[in-house]
Image (cartoon, rainbow, N blue to C red):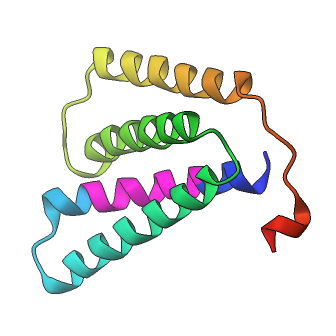
Amino acid sequence: MNKEWLKVVIASFFEVIWVVGLKHADSILEWSFTIIGIIISFYLMVMAGKYLPVGTVYAVFVGLGTAGTVLSEILFFGEPLQFSKIALILLLIIGVVGLKLVTEESPVDEEAES
């Protein structure tokens, strides 16, 4: 995985943080972390979109973020575990991985990156 895809994965992790924060934040500190999560996730997604196909970046970002958010709700906030949710998350992840695998990456110009 190159560093641009790593940015998308990290952006998705921060998406989970801010989406969960939108629902559960009660204090100024929690809202601050939510806002920081929004800024980091969108910054990384936009930076990755400069070198990767934007549609694929967005689909992977949202897919991983959605899967992470649902799993976080189940693991940390007592959302009921349902087989159908797990099956659909697995289907979503298969689609995201498939998109990444079929996306042709254009060579990155090292001088333009600096």
Observer-nearest of 64 and 82:
64
The quadrant where residue 42 appears: bottom left
How many circles with numbers are drawn on the protein?
0
13 sits left or right of 29 in the view: right
4 sits left or right of 99 in the view: right
> What residue do we see at 35% from left, 66% from top?
38
The vertical placement of 33 against 59, above or below, is below
The vertical placement of 114 against 112, above or below, is below
> What residue do we see at 81% from left, 75% from top?
114
- Kindly give the residue lying farthest to the front in the view shown: 112
Where does residue 96 sit, x and y in percent of width and height?
55, 27
> What residue do we see at 71% from left, 27% from top?
103
The vertical placement of 64 against 20, above or below, is above
Q: Is residue 109 magenta?
A: no
Observer-nearest of 87 and 65:
65
The vertical placement of 93 against 32, above or below, is above
Where does residue 108 sit, x and y in percent of width and height?
84, 52
> What residue do we see at 77% from left, 29% from top?
104
46 sits left or right of 81 in the view: right
Where does residue 27 sit, x and y in percent of width and height?
12, 81
Where does residue 13 sit, x and y in percent of width and height?
48, 55
Quadrant containing the N terminus is top right
Observer-nearest of 48 and 31:
48
Q: Which residues are magenta?
A: 8-19
Q: Is residue 11 magenta?
A: yes
Query: Secondary structure of the magenta portion, mostly?
Result: helix
Observer-nearest of 37 and 42:
42
3 sits left or right of 16 in the view: right
- Kindly give the residue lying farthest to the bottom in the view shown: 28
The quadrant where residue 79 appears: top left
- Kindly give the residue lying farthest to the left in the view shown: 26
